[in-house]
Image (spheres, rainbow, N blue to C red):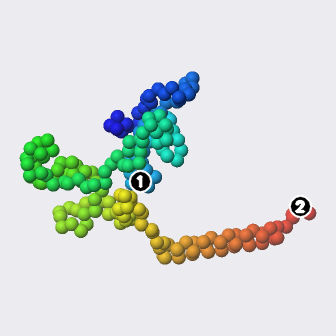
Amino acid sequence: VQEYMECAQIEFPEDENRRLEEEEIQYYIGPYCAESGSAILLGVFNDEFCTNFASEGDAGRSVYYDNMAEALPYGSESLVDMNCIPCKEPGDADMQNNQNDQQDEDEVVEFCELAYEQAGKCENRLSINNPNSNACTYMDGISIFRRDGEVIMRDLSSSSAASVFIGIFSATFVAAGAYVYYLKTKLDRAKINLAE
């Protein structure tokens, strides 16, 4: 599986029953996001960039099964586990990130520290000095429902003030258009032919 973490060509074993064309189709295996966005799966593709599935509807799993007589690993279950990773350093100093994280004063694993530093934050309600609230607006716009790890956007209700302004703008636009038409027809009737 490790060699297919990036799109890579797969060589299927030769099969006497399989009819080979002059130029055999090349297949590639690579990761892709599930339609729901809650899983990363492996699929079989027919291009070197892993963008076109080898068979529609099953992400190329049937092509893999036909050639290997077994199911594609991680074709149906996610490569990424949804279980939480503990961020507290183990009590044993030898187990602390291969001894690279022993010197710091905190009890947090270095991986978690780095992930937190790069993550969007909304620290408004924390009693800390200089809270970072750069991602508060984004986080207010989503609700997280953990059905297989899926993030679902919250239904946004329409603003009544925005609806009123849209209505006023629309009515003003129609009224201005009608007035322009009225003036144009009045000018057309008032034209005098000076050539006569």
Q: Measured along the vertical axis of the image, is residue 108 above or below residue 22? A: below
Residue labelled with disc 2: 195
User: Horizontal placement of 114 versus 29: left or right?
Assistant: left
Q: Residue at x 20, y 54 (%)?
A: 86
Q: Please tell me whether mark 2 sits on a helix, a strand or a loop.
A: loop
Q: Measured along the vertical axis of the image, is residue 112 above or below residue 73? A: below
Q: Residue at x 41, y 33 (%)?
A: 8
Looking at this view, is 27 or 102 the one in front? 27
Q: Which mark is residue 100?
A: none
Task: Tell me where residue 171 sits by quadrant.
Answer: bottom right
User: Horizontal placement of 66 versus 112: left or right?
Assistant: right
Residue labelled with disc 1: 37
Distance, label 2 to label 1, CA atoms, is: 74 Å
Looking at this view, is 108 or 10 the one in front? 10
Task: Tell me where residue 126 sits by quadrant.
Answer: bottom left
Q: Residue at x 30, y 56 (%)?
A: 120
Mark closer to the chain start, 2 or 1: 1
